[in-house]
Image (cartoon, coloured by chain):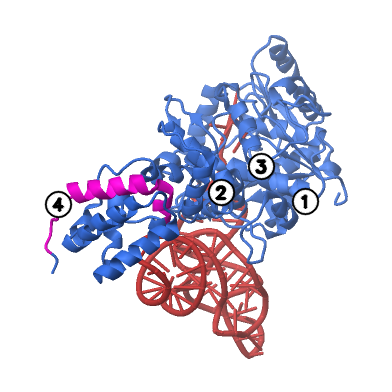
Chain colours: A blue, B red
Amino acid sequence: MSNREVRVRFAPSPTGALHIGGVRTALYNYLFAKKMGGKMLLRIEDTDQTRFVSGAEDYIKDTLAWVGITLDEDPWQGGPNAPYRQSERKPMYMEYAKKLVNEGNAYYAFDTSEELEDMRKRLEAAKVASPAYNSITRNTMKNSLTLPEDEVNAKLAAGEPYVIRLKVPRKDEIRLNDMIRGWVMVHSSAIDDKVLMKSDGMPTYHLANVVDDYLMGISHVIRGEEWLPSAPLHVLLYKFLGWEEAMPQFAHLPLILKPDGNGKLSKRDADTHGFPVFPIKWIDDNGKQVLSFKEEGYLPDALVNFLAFLGWNPGTAQEIFSLQELIEAFSIERIGKSGTKFDIHKAKWFNQQYLRSKSDQELASYLIDSLRHKGIDCDQERAEKICALMKERVTFPKDFGEEALYFFQAPSSYDEQVVANKWNEESVEVVKSFAIELSKLSTVSAEEAKSTLHHLLEQKGIKIGKVMQALRVAITGHAAGPDLMHIIEIIGNVETTNRLNTAANTISIKSVNI
RNA sequence: GGUCGAUUCGUCUAGGGGUUAGGACGUGUCCCUUUCACGGACAAAACACGGGUUCGAUUCCCGUAUCGACUACCA
């Protein structure tokens, strides 16, 4: 069992946009498979036709491609275990369900939803702790255990709707050794007679999942903690199906929780908290585009790194990991047990780290792109110079475009605080003379601009600290930004001179400095 | 309600019978500096509680509390 080939699977349902927790599950599966030299496949669990959302499957595919998770087998490229959509595997499940029935481990049930409802009400009225269709109550219901055999056959022959339920033993201790949680024991009385085959002929998750994992040779099931309660049921299924030898090892991942600590992170949190929980662009039911990591400007590598650390850590001080490094460092043993609150600040920090580590050349393309949307053209060389100046101060690629506007346009307004505090006769005097000095030059480098300014201030006996803010606001309109002399170099002396003069002529000296 | 799970700074976490309980994000102060950022330094900040076991428990055991998941012909 321990030496068998590692085969893992990611098995999402196409019921909506894959959210970030799903991406993390996929990532952990991927990291483990790669680390162990195994394979990873993707299976679409679309047994619930009522919840099918068109576009969801493509979304899964596009998301995994974006974050760099590659699959060895999947519905799109196929593979030795095709098909990889449960809807396309429909005929396979009944065979196993019938085997369970024939061997006395499952049974047909004909109860209508009204009858089930009645049962629950009856049990609740009788103050039964946990109303369920189980080893006790099944004796009072309409199923192949209570009905005469010929009546059952007649119903079946007549095409009456039925489900197949697992006949969970009355007294049994089910145990499983979870790779993350250790031994988990559950008494069979806590499990109800789960529906295996629905009346529409589709299997439920439980049956389909176990059958497919077996058929596809899955060695390790790595999935969210929300599955832990039904894991004993799956163990039981493996046992009844006679597949105990081939049963995969389970690893139930801690949940990703809301930042405020109340429940698991949900799709709705994207709106309420103003940060994305979806990886890439998605239009919701109302036709509204929801926030996504990609659209917000998160780099896939940064997101992967962030996600990897949500519940796992390498045990060293290293925090920045490429996907390849994650593969090498990954181990299931180092996955934590407790839920992890989602912290968007940390995600931003990772993004900043990754963005900063990119070359000016690469960054320039973000800037050019972003400016183009604003109708501004910028050549590569200039963009690289601007990015070199800005890279230490941005978190997202879009920041380049938003904060770099003054390289292309004269300010349309001036920071009021600076004007109020630093715009006085003395500083305006410097603004004017600096403009005159700059206009004498044909071109200007940052060094030249600096020495020109220093000479000027020396002559006038003014300290640099008293005028820099005024100069900056005159040239950029802003109170803060990168080195002003380098900004001047990029803007050029003609434009700088114009801006200085414009500012000197339009900003009135508001306050009298004390 | 029942079943299962979890519990170390605000957050992510390391650690583990004897430690000044370590790091990171965030926060604050200082330094650098023409501003903001970056960088550097420093600081505040945690073993949920109660019982055991033990010479000694944050670490092991048992309870309690709190939080969470599950409790569908959904996955």
Q: State the residue at coordinates (26%, 66%).
A: A466
Q: Which residue is mark 4?
A: A508
Residue A461 in the figure: left or right of residue A75: left
Q: Which residues are magenta?
A: A486-512
Sequence-first disc among 1 and 4: 1
Local crowd at mark 3 within 10 Å, few (<14), some, or many (≥20)?
A: many
Image quadrant where residue A513 sits: bottom left
User: Can residue A126 be seen in the rendering of this structure?
Assistant: no
Q: Which chain letter matches label 4?
A: A
- Seen in the picture, residue A314 relative to A375 is either above or below; the reply is below
Give the CA distance from mark 2 to mark 4. 39 Å
Q: Tell me, yes or no, whether the two marked residues, 2 and 1, touch with CB atoms within 8 Å.
A: no
Q: Position of residue B69 (x, y in %)?
A: 55, 45
Residue B59 or residue A259, whichever sits in front: A259
Q: Which residue is mark 1?
A: A35
Give the CA distance from mark 1 to mark 4. 66 Å
Q: Position of residue A488 (x, y in %)?
A: 39, 52
Sequence-first disc among 1 and 3: 3
Q: Which residue is mark 2?
A: A360
Q: Which chain letter matches label 3?
A: A
Residue A490 or residue A67, whichever sits in front: A490
Q: Position of residue A232 (x, y in %)?
A: 70, 45
Judged by its main secondary structure, the magenta piece is helix
Task: Identify the disc placed on residue A26.
Answer: 3
